[in-house]
Image (cartoon, grey):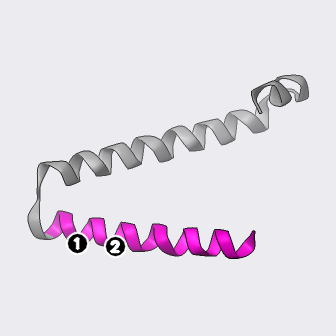
Amino acid sequence: MTMVLLILAVACGAFCVWLTVRIVNRREQWTAWTVVAIAVLVYVAGLVVLMDRKLPAPLSNWID
């Protein structure tokens, strides 16, 4: 499992670098929308994690 997380972390970092280079060099419309979509996904994932920690145990088990 540790190896999988390491590979995913490296892939995510490489994707972020690639996307940054695309935005800086080309300023295409799809890159801006991709950044917005990724930001929204990260924001929603962060909210889910924070909400899961504050829910009582029965509700937390129901969500999983």
x and y, in percent, of residue 39 in the image: 40, 47
Residue under the point 69% across and 33% down? 51
For residue 21, the mark is 1
Which residue, given by chain and number where applicable, does mark 2 sit on?
Answer: 17
By secondary structure, the bulk of the magenta-drawn segment is best described as helix
User: How far apart in space, not on screen, are marks 1 and 2 (Cα)?
Assistant: 6 Å
In this view, the residue in front, 47 or 2, is 2
Using a 10 Å C-alpha cutoff, classify the residue at mark 1 as few (fewer than 14 neighbours), some (14 to 19) or many (20 or more).
Answer: few
Q: SS for tag 2?
A: helix
Quadrant position of residue 48: top right
Q: Is residue 27 magenta?
A: no
Mark 2 is surrounded, within 10 Å at the Cα level, by few (under 14), some (14 to 19) or many (20 or more) other residues, namely few
Q: Secondary structure at mark 1?
A: helix
In the rendered view, does 48 fall on the left or right side of 39? right
The magenta stretch is 1-24
- Counting from the top left corner in percent of width and height, residue 40 is at 42, 41
Q: What number is the disc on residue 9?
A: none
Give the residue drawn at x 57%, y 42%.
Answer: 45
Q: Amino acid at mark 1?
A: Val
